[in-house]
Amino acid sequence: MRLGDLLAKHPSVTMQPDSAETKDLFIFGVTEDSRDVRYGFLFCALPGVNEDGLAYCPQAAARGAQAIAVPEGTRDEALGLNEYEREKIAVLRVRDIRGFYGRLAADFHAGRPGNHRWAGPTGLAPERSDSPHGPFRRRAERPRGRPVTKKIPFSDATIIREIAASL
């Protein structure tokens, strides 16, 4: 997605520097987590309850962000970018940064199966409600009829460990 196309979809966004070169930049991904930024990504500096995304703008710039979206009214000094980064990275000032990020992520990932992250309880499987452990049981408890792992004598285990370490 070109940065110019993104600005056309979101006319309330202001960009600095606003030039033809900047509008031709290609955005490869969108994220609000500076640890996930790769070359060509747009980093959205979302304000948080405990921490502000503006504190992570230098980290996003160092990881190769093409553009950084910040809330409207944010001063340049608050970004923490050096002079070189200010010239090379497009700064988008947005009135509703959370809404902008949500719409942008939906546009960017539309029709791309497999790019979604699902969260849920891990290590749990459904069980009968009359179970003494409640509605869930641990996966570590094996169902009946399943073979148990064979114990390896100490000397064999040492050999296996040495072979695995050499691989």
Image (cartoon, rainbow, N blue to C red):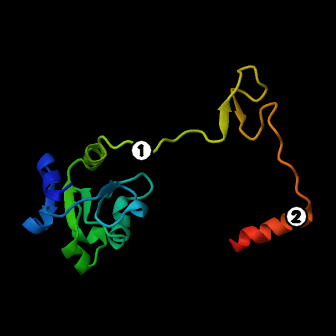
Q: Is residue 131 visible?
A: yes
- The reply to whether discs 1 and 2 touch (Cβ–Cβ < 8 Å) is no
Q: Which mark is residue 156?
A: 2
Q: Quadrant of residue 155?
A: bottom right
User: Three-letter amino acid code at disc 1?
Assistant: Gly
Pick the quarter of the image with the N terminus.
bottom left
Percent position of residue 99, x then y: 27, 44
User: Three-letter amino acid code at disc 2?
Assistant: Asp
Residue at position x 51%, y 41% in the image = 119
15 relative to 56 in the view: left or right: left
Residue of label 1: 114
Q: Is residue 112 above or below residue 3?
A: above
- In the structure shown, which secondary structural element does the residue marked by tag 1 occupy? loop
Percent position of residue 39, x then y: 32, 67
Q: Quadrant of residue 142?
A: top right
Q: Is residue 11 visible?
A: no
Percent position of residue 49, x then y: 42, 51
